[in-house]
Image: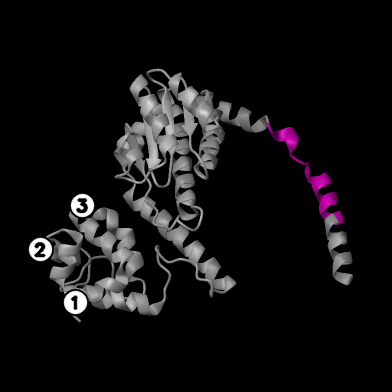
Amino acid sequence: MHVAEPAGEGNEAQSGERFLERLSARRNRLSPSEQRVADFVLANPGRVIHMSIGNLADTVGVSQPTVLRFVRSLGLKRYPDLKLLTGQSIVSGTPYVHSEVDARDSLEAIVGKVIDSSILALGELRSSIDQSALEQAVDALTRAPRIDCYGTGSASALAIEAQHKLMRFGIPVVAYADTHIQRLAAATLRRGDVAICFSHTGMVADTLKMAERAQAIGATVIGVTKPGTALAYASDILLAVDAHENTEIYAPMISRVVHGATIDIVATAMALKFGPKHFERLREAKDSLSDLRINPPERSRREGRVGERQQKARKR
């Protein structure tokens, strides 16, 4: 096998064991047409190993030279090298971003797959996040008189998390649980206000309605979702989060982790943009919860009682 060794990556490209993981991590650094090839390979590795270069190009809807450019972007010289590494990745059974928990998996395998997928998705976010869009989002949020956070289903938890982080800056921030109230709230936004809309798929009708309503009024819509989706197109600023996972069976897991990290990035950048004058406000917000915490001596007594109960239970 003839494989070019990309600068700074050692012999990594020569190993098929985690090839599909590395392909997924590099996806956003490829050209749009090459990304289409990458998406097909990631979604259909078992088919790719039996396809000629012409068959793959026709199936994806690109030219054969595009497929060759895609192959070379991965540090490979020939199309057969792509088929070989893809096949090795399948045979190795190494979990990659599209892998799902199998009914036969041990608890150890479940732990490994879930955590490895989360780590990979966070690494992809780090390398692919749009710095310009992030700067625009932080600027809009720090100047906003009001911020609304919208999300339905599992994304509602993300809206609440965003409210929890952003309200500490002294800006009115609200996350509404009821979708009818969300629509009413979107209708009361004004120019300069910001609506943050969360959706893993970007194809949820309720969230799209909120975004469209807010945008029509003149508020700034920040979409935290997959690129190329209805919500992405309805957003003034797109914070693209493209975590690959099957949500037809499972509730979103990996995407939730990446969305949460995006919220943390935005909140941290806002704190630094506001500067030292707001640090005292953040401290006051945190201190407002201090009386809810158990002081150390009381905690020690409680832990002692819990320990005694656990020892008695083990003796029984």
Q: Are marks 1 and 2 in contact (CB under 8 Å)?
A: no
Whether residue 108 is in magenta: the answer is no
Position of residue 242 relative to residue 151, above or below, is below
The amino acid pointed to by label 1 is Pro
Residue 72 visible to an observer of this rendering: no
- Indicate the quadrant where residue 47 lies: bottom left
| Residue at the image point whose x is 20% and y is 60% from the top | 60
The amino acid pointed to by label 2 is Pro
Given residues 162 and 179, the one toward you in this image is 179
Looking at the rendering, the stretch of residues picked out in magenta corresponds to 289-305
Q: CA distance from mark 1 to mark 3?
A: 22 Å
| Residue at the image point whose x is 36% and y is 55% from the top | 124
> In this rendering, would 303 be left or right of 186?
right
- Residue 119: x %, y % from top left: 45, 59
Q: Which residue is mark 1?
A: 80
Q: Main secondary structure of the magenta part?
A: helix
Given residues 165 and 248, the one toward you in this image is 248
Given residues 186 and 32, the one toward you in this image is 186
Q: CA distance from mark 3 to mark 2?
A: 14 Å
Q: Which residue is mark 2?
A: 65
Which numbered circle lies on residue 32?
Answer: 3
